[in-house]
Every structure is written in C-alpha cells, then in structure tokens.
Image: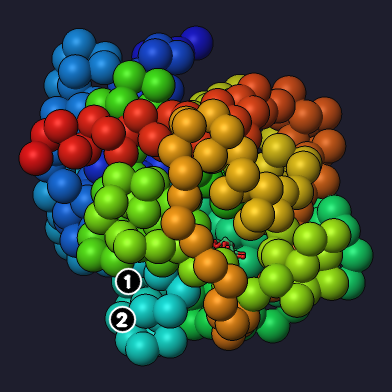
Amino acid sequence: MAYEKILVTGGAGYIGSHAVVELYQAGYQPVIVDNFSNSEESALQGIESIIGTSVPVYRVDCADESALRGVFAAEPNIAGVIHFAAFKAVGESVQKPLAYFKNNVGSLLALLAVMPEFGVENLVFSSSCTVYGIPDALPVTEATPTKPASSPYGRTKQMCEDIMHDVSAAPDNKLRTILLRYFNPIGAHDSAKIGELPLGVPNNLVPFITQTAAGIREKLTINGNDYDTPDGTNIRDYIHVVDLAKSHVVAVQRLLDHKATETVETFNVGTGHGNSVLEVVQTFERVTGQKLNYSIGPRRPGDVPAIYADATKAEQVLGFKTETSLADSLASAWKWQQALADKK
Ligand code: UFG
C-alpha cells in the first residue's frame, strides 16, 4: 500500500530530486531534508512544477543529530528513509578529506541514531561502484570483492556500507537496509524541469560535454586514450537518472513489504553495458547534431580503466531494469542544458 511517508535526505540534489518525483508519482509522500550545500531552491520549483504540488522541505544539515531529530518529531509515521545527502566530488575529497568524513559518515551516524528513536526501520542508502576500486574482472557483480578506495570520497562509501553491516548485525537490531551501488548517473528529467546543477567547472563527463556544446567551456579534454580498452578511452556504465531514481522506489517498496531476505541487501544499479568516453562523445554529437570541440589529454589520476555492472541481481530480485538508452539519456542532458541557458 502506497501513500507512506518517505524521508529523502539530499532530496533537492541531482539524484534526490528525481527520486522525489518518482516516489510521488508512485503514490508515496516524500519529505525532503536538505541543507542546500550543493543544491538550489530552483530544484524545489522544478519538482513542484512536475508533480503539481509542493513537498515538505526541511532546511537541515543531516549530520546535525538534534536538528534531524526535530524533523522526525515534526513528521510522524515516517515509513522509510532514502539517504542521498553526501558530498560526491572525488577530487575535492582529496583536498578536504575531513569535510567528507564529517559530512558523509556523520550524516549516516546521525540518521542511525535517530531512526530507532522513532521506530523507523527501513533505509535505502546511496552507495557507489567506486567501492569496487579497479576490479579484476568485468562486469562487476555484488559479490565482486571491494578494493581499497582510491579517494576519501570512495572510502566514505565503503565506511558507510561497513557501518550499516555492523549495525545490522547487532543483537537488538531492527534496521533493514538496501545498499544501491550506483554506476554513472547522467541526463535529466524529460520535462527539463530538474537536472544536474554543477557548481563551477564540472568534474563529470556529461555536464562537461553539454557545457562545451553550449559554448560555456572551450573544449572537452578526454582523459587519456591509451588504456587497454577497444578505443583506448575509459569505459563506464552510464545510467539515466530517472531510471536510477526508479530503483529507489522499488527498493523502498521491497523494504516496506518485508520482502528483504537479509538485513542488508546490496544491488548494483547500472545498465549492464559499458561505453567508452569516445562513444559517449560520438553518441552526443549524433543525437544532438552538435559538433563537439575536444582533444585527447593525459590520464586523470585515480581513474578506473573500465567498469560496468552486472545488473542481473537487481533485475531478478527487484524486478528493476533500465529503460533509457545512452542516446536518449544524452538527449535529455542536452535538453536540460538548453533549459538552463533559457533561465539565465
Ligand atoms: N572524463 C573525461 N573528461 C572530462 C571528464 C571526465 O575524459 O572532462 C572521463 C573520465 O576520465 C572518465 C569518464 O569520463 O573516464 C567518466 O568520468 P566522470 O567524472 O563523469 O565519472 P567517474 O566514473 O570518474 O566517477 C563516477 C562518479 C563518482 C564515483 C565514480 C566511481 O562521479 O562519484 O564514478 O567509479 F565515485
């Protein structure tokens, strides 16, 4: 039975805002907690314009345990939590490791302290394929061993996963958790009312491509073409953000239906296909008709040569399968970039 209230931390962020829309459209009552450290109020207007109503929003830092407690007190009968709120820039995490541990680990600890006080037992957590490091074999399954993280950001995701395993193993535990290991989310809502809002120079490939096509950046530098891959560029599993958002709806439904078979379940959330950086660039050019100015540069330190998901477990257990092609995902990213330009 839907209509349950779901607390969405980081609900004004890139993935969180799309998940709020999908939750609402599936019949849930999303409640947003966000401190707007890496998101903007305009995301709320975008959500409202898509779903035709406003969603409760608490401007709270999730790592602030007493403020978070106030949200739970103000919102009785929360059925589950989806915890997106986190810093996510790999390079920045090397510069500011403490900020990453404080925010990413701190917000999870605060949630895990407060949830049982209010009898909330269901948690969906945003993890990342970064936990696999440089894998020995492809595609990666959930049983693929994790490797030492290559950045403090990656380490926070591993630590958070470990914390939830330990908490769930305690004798008096009531928490049930689903860890979703995201591959590379791209694109935007088809309405072009919500999407990614990179602050400053984007780190990620697709916003860099769309900003280059829009003339905001002079050219894209491809980070190396001498990898041991068919065209020499890195391979990733690019998943449309709306598909990714939908995986949270099925995960939370599984918890509420008491269908989880373990206290912590882990799923890869990807398409199951790898695409090279050059393929992404060429597909973007083909679907948008934009000629992209790019050149080949040196390798980016810390880049994994190739990684993509084995998406079988999510399909078999959650009944989740991605629906959007790389071409359509890139078209949606371009539509969003143009909508952003129109707003200015
Ligand atoms: N790339 C370029 N030029 C750019 C930007 C990116 O060639 O200007 C390349 C990267 O080198 C990489 C690919 O495009 O080969 C994708 O890079 P992103 O930065 O978009 O994504 P990553 O795969 O590096 O990072 C993503 C998430 C992280 C997560 C990581 C796990 O952004 O949060 O996957 O592998 F930790």
Q: Residues within 10 Å of mark 2 (few under 14, many from 20)?
A: some
Q: Quadrant of residue 326?
A: top right
Residue 337 image offset from top left, x and y in percent: 30, 39
Q: Which residue is tagged 1?
A: 103
**Does 170 sit above or below residue 45?**
below
Residue 22 in sight here = yes
Does dot 1 land on a helix, a strand or a loop? helix
> What whole-number distance in Å separates the C-alpha atoms at marks 2 and 1?
6 Å
Does dot 2 land on a helix, a strand or a loop? helix
Mark 1 is on which residue type? Asn
Mark 2 is on which residue type? Ala
The numbered disc on residue 99 is: 2
Q: Residue at x 39, y 35 (%)?
A: 334
Of the four image quadrants, the one with ligand 1 is bottom right
Q: Are marks 2 and 1 in contact (CB under 8 Å)?
A: yes
Q: Residue at x 17, y 54 (%)?
A: 36
Which residue sits furthest right? 137
Viewer-proximal residue, 220 or 252? 220
